[in-house]
Image (cartoon, helix red, strand yellow):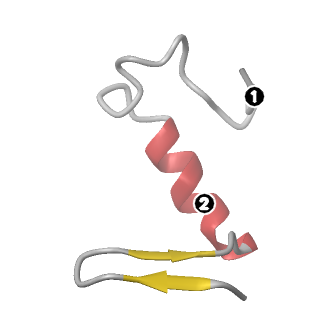
Amino acid sequence: MIILETERLRIRNWQESDRPLFAEINADPKVMEFFPRQRSRKNPTY
């Protein structure tokens, strides 16, 4: 696993356990305001 860290940020490889939070974040209209359309589990790609 590759991990890059700064004082404020941690970047690591994707983990399967990230999927539920990722889906929740991408279903939030405020988060997706400037994207062409919202993602959902039914429509996961653009």
Q: Quadrant of the C terminus?
A: top right
Name the residue carrying label 1.
Answer: 45
Q: Which mark is residue 19?
A: none
Q: Residues within 10 Å of mark 2 (few under 14, many from 20)?
A: few
Q: Residues within 10 Å of mark 1 (few under 14, many from 20)?
A: few
Most distant residue in the top direction: 36
Name the residue carrying label 2.
Answer: 20
Q: Please report the residue visible at 33 percent of the width from the left and 74 percent of the height from the top.
A: 9
Relative vertical location of residue 39 with respect to residue 2 in this rendering, above or below = above
**Helix, strand or loop at mark 1:** loop
Q: Earlier in the sequence, mark 2 or mark 1?
A: 2
Q: Nearer the viewer, residue 27 or 12?
A: 12
* Quarter of the image where one finds residue 3: bottom right
Most distant residue in the left direction: 7
- x then y, percent, for residue 31: 35, 34
Please give the count of numbered marks on the rendered protein: 2
Q: Quadrant of the N terminus?
A: bottom right
- x then y, percent, for residue 13: 67, 74
Q: Nearer the viewer, residue 34 or 30?
A: 34
Q: Please report the residue visible at 50 percent of the width from the left and 39 percent of the height from the top.
A: 26
**What amino acid type is highlighted by mark number 1?**
Thr
- x then y, percent, for residue 21: 52, 60
